[in-house]
């Protein structure tokens, strides 16, 4: 949720995750990034089977363990302890990324520092300041069929994050399919099309959204 | 008769360590890291090392110890977050880091162990990772050439090994340990338990003995957890 002109409006982190969960389909194999994307697992619709992949080598991520079930050998890509399901499988990192690069994973949800109007994504470093590394993000955006970005609409200093061209080093070129922010949802049917505004969060006008977005999009 | 089983980490690394060699190390975060072997590398005092490892554990654990002692000159990694000293040494230029996407790193190791000197991948095309590397178009899409990694020494943590070198891992502690093992000219494995041949199911070996040259039992292990996350109630 964002404070605009003294009014709190827009979607919360959990609501953004719930909106991202609407992109899931029955039978999907899905990889969730760290942060808000991880919350998407809490919003899988009832009756839908979605198998979560963890790039450190697991298919079928279960819920966080009960205290007595905690196992140091069983973690997700965010290094949090997790549990297994009857249908879970384990494999090594080369196999894990073979399935990612090989197009076997249907959808991934990732965070972002910047998304450009042409679908470029930057989420792994700010030169000279913040360097975490790309981890598996470059492989995911190169190989997964559908790329969903979940991010705050504006940076902490108020500057837009959905912009004409990325200023930070790229994670992938022309890779993003859907952008979900605390203020709006943008999507495009293919990587040759511009983003189209699909939804605006309650309490936000289209004019306010335009003021907070420097990227061009179709309304 | 030759044996692959060594009494301890120092003995298992004897004759393998020199300054400026390339070491590949398994592990993801602090899960499945070859901590006994890394301790022995630290004690050996070798320096100028290049280390290929997805990340470098956390401060003062695993490879984090070799960063503290400045024995590492260069890291080949996908992620330095979670280790402040790693990030600091990179930002100040004291440490060289070859940022490699996680899947590309795993495949570079797998390829190195499989006799494949390089491969084309879509990962990283159009980013800093592809700069200076040859690209090629296949079926209308651009791919970048990535080179294999062959390490002088591979350091691996596993669950169990039999005395012939067949190895099994446990849950997500397998991670990079398999590609790391295969890319080593010499592969040293530390395990929680060494068993006799026949004790492991031949149909369920994760790493066949041909890849494993030296084995130690590193037990007992006091496995650490980076982020302990739990739920309080049963879920349907």
Image (cartoon, coloured by chain):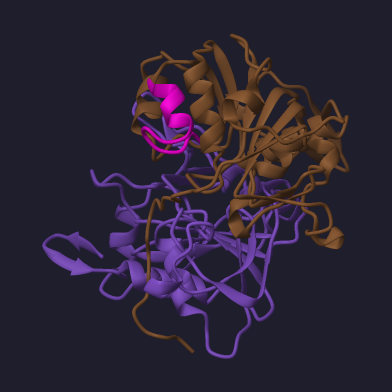
Chain colours: A purple, B brown
Q: Nearer the viewer, residue B231 or B128?
A: B231
Q: Nearer the viewer, residue A101 or A157?
A: A101
Residue A134 horizontal/vertical position (percent) = 53, 39
Tell me if residue B40 can be seen. yes
Tell me if residue B99 can be seen. no
Q: Quadrant of the N terminus of chain A?
A: bottom left
Residue B173 horizontal/vertical position (percent) = 59, 52
Residue B13 horizontal/vertical position (percent) = 64, 23
Q: Please identify the quarter of the rendering in which residue A14 is found.
A: bottom left
Q: Residue furthest front?
A: B1
At x 47%, y 43%, the residue is A123
At x 54%, y 41%, the residue is B33
Q: Which residues are magenta?
A: B55-68
Above/below status of B115 relative to A119: above
At x 75%, y 61%, the residue is A104
Above/below status of A46 relative to A214: below
Residue A33 horizontal/vertical position (percent) = 50, 56
Q: Nearer the viewer, residue A158 or B111?
A: B111
């Amino acid at each position: 949720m964002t404070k605009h002109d003294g009014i709190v409006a827009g979607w919360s982190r959990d609501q953004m995750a719930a909106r991202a969960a609407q992109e899931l389909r029955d039978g999907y194999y899905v990889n969730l990034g760290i942060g808000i994307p991880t919350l998407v697992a809490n919003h899988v619709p009832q009756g839908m089977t979605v198998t979560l992949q963890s790039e450190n080598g697991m298919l079928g991520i279960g819920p966080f363990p009960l205290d007595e079930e905690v196992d140091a050998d069983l973690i997700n890509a965010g290094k949090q302890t997790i549990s297994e399901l009857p249908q879970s499988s384990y494999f090594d990192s080369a196999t894990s990324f073979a399935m990612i690069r090989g197009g076997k994973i249907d959808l991934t949800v990732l965070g972002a520092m910047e998304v450009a109007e042409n679908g470029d994504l930057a989420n792994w470093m700010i030169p000279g300041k913040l360097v975490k590394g790309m981890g598996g993000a470059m492989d995911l955006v190169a190989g997964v069929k559908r790329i969903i970005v979940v991010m705050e609409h504006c940076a902490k200093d108020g500057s837009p994050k959905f912009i004409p061209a990325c200023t930070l080093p790229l994670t992938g070129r022309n890779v993003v399919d859907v952008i979900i922010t605390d203020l709006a949802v943008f999507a495009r049917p293919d990587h040759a099309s511009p983003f189209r505004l699909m939804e605006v969060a309650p309490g936000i006008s289209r004019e306010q959204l335009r003021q907070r977005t420097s990227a061009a999009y179709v309304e | 008769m030759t044996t692959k089983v060594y009494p301890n980490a120092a003995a298992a690394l004897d004759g393998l360590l020199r300054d400026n060699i390339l070491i590949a190390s398994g592990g993801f975060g602090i899960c499945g890291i070859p901590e006994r072997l890394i301790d022995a590398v630290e004690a050996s005092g070798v320096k100028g090392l290049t280390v290929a490892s997805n990340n470098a554990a956390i401060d003062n654990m695993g490879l984090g110890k070799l960063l503290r002692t400045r024995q590492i000159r260069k890291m080949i990694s996908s992620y330095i977050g979670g280790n402040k000293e790693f990030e600091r040494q990179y930002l100040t230029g004291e440490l060289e880091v070859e940022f490699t996407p996680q899947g590309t790193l795993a495949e570079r190791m797998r390829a190195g162990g499989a006799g494949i000197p390089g491969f084309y991948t879509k990962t990283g095309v159009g980013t800093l990772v592809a700069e200076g590397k040859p690209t090629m178009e296949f079926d209308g899409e651009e791919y970048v050439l990535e080179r294999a990694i062959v390490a002088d020494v591979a350091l691996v943590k596993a669950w169990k090994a039999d005395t012939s070198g067949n190895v099994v891992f446990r849950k997500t502690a397998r991670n990079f340990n398999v590609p790391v093992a295969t890319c080593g000219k010499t592969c040293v494995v530390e395990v929680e338990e060494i068993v006799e041949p026949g004790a492991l199911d031949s149909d369920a070996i994760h790493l066949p003995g041909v890849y494993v040259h030296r084995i130690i039992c590193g037990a007992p292990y006091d496995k650490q957890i980076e982020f302990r996350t739990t739920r309080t109630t049963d879920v349907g």
